[in-house]
Image: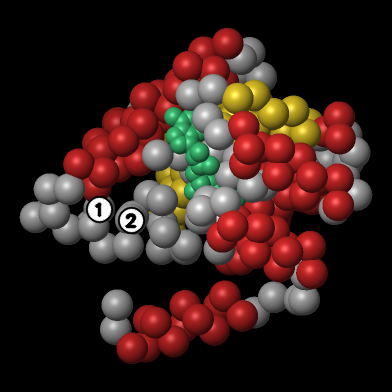
């Protein structure tokens, strides 16, 4: 990253109102070694969930709940987030975070298990937003299984879509970079999805189901 880009990224990450609950969540994340979405991505998740008036959302990669909190803050006050992770301890920490943030507990449904498997048990066309922030090696299968869950107009949002510069560099043969590249190619082949790839956080892919 050039000096100018690095300075711009640092400035962007500082351009937020003070948020003690989110700050505490970030400290918690480091204790659980669960890298949370950066502030810019959390802010965008909240705005997207809010502008779409989301009532049903699904997330793969709860971590300690930084992205969950952002989504729940943005969603309709009646909205329910179903959040999936393989790590029960992190999910327990996420539930505590949601309580501390004074969000009603029934709005945050956690399921412990591999996202790529759990998604097959959820309702097709039933979700207005799917957020994926999981292990890159599992990403393509997870995304393939998340897309059929989207309602018409629903949003698919994938974090870690650039893995710093690795995904954009075709000479980089790291398996995680290759897995993310394959996922992006699969998304690009889908007729019913419009898409944009943003260099926010570790790369954010936002796609919208355009078919009815
Ligand atoms: C980057 S962290 C998620 C951070 C979270 N989105 C946040 O902002 O706080 C990735 C999470 O994915 C979980 N994970 C890894 N493989 C998974 C899988 N196959 N299915 C579901 N979760 C998985 C890890 O346990 C970890 O908590």
Q: Is residue 129 above or below residue 68?
A: above
Q: Residue at x 37, y 88 (%)?
A: 4
Q: Residue at x 54, y 22 (%)?
A: 113
| For residue 20, side relative to residue 126 (left or right) | right
* Image coords of residue 58 (percent x, y): 63, 31
Q: Residue at x 13, y 54 (%)?
A: 172
* Residue nearest the observer in this picture, 179 or 78: 179
Residue at mark 1 to residue at mark 2: CA–CA distance: 6 Å
* Image coords of residue 31 (percent x, y): 59, 57
Label 2 Cα neighbours within 10 Å, binned few <14 / some 14-19 / many ≥20: some
Q: Quarter-wise, where is residue 155 in the image? A: top right
Q: Secondary structure at mark 2?
A: loop
Disc 1 to disc 2: CB gap under 8 Å: yes
Extreme residue in the left direction? 171
| For residue 32, side relative to residue 74 (left or right) | left
Q: Indicate the quadrant containing the N terminus: top left, top right, bottom left or bottom right.
A: bottom left
Q: Secondary structure at mark 1?
A: loop
* Residue nearest the observer in this picture, 61 or 209: 61
The answer to whether residue 211 is visible is: no
Q: Indicate the quadrant containing the C terminus: top left, top right, bottom left or bottom right.
A: top right
Checking the image for residue 163, the label placed there is 2
> Which residue bears the numbered disc 1?
167
**What scheme was used to colour the molecule?**
secondary structure
């Amino acid at each position: 990253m050039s000096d100018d880009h690095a300075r711009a990224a640092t400035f962007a990450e500082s351009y937020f109102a003070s948020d003690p609950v989110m700050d505490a969540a970030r400290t918690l994340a480091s204790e659980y070694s669960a890298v949370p979405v950066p502030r810019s991505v959390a802010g965008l998740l909240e705005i997207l969930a809010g502008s779409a008036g989301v009532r049903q959302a699904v997330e793969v990669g709860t971590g300690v709940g930084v992205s969950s909190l952002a989504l729940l803050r943005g969603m309709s006050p009646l909205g329910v987030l179903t959040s999936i992770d393989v790590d029960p301890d992190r999910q327990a920490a996420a539930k505590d975070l949601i309580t501390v943030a004074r969000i009603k507990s029934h709005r945050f449904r956690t399921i412990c298990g591999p996202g790529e498997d759990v998604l097959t048990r959820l309702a097709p066309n039933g979700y207005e937003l799917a957020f994926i922030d999981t292990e890159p090696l599992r990403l393509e299968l997870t995304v393939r299984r998340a897309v059929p869950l989207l309602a018409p107009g629903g949003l698919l949002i994938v974090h870690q879509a650039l893995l710093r510069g690795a995904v954009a560099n075709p000479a980089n043969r790291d398996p995680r970079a290759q897995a993310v590249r394959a996922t992006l190619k699969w998304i690009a082949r889908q007729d019913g999805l419009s898409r944009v790839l943003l260099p926010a956080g570790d790369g954010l892919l936002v796609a919208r189901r355009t078919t009815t």
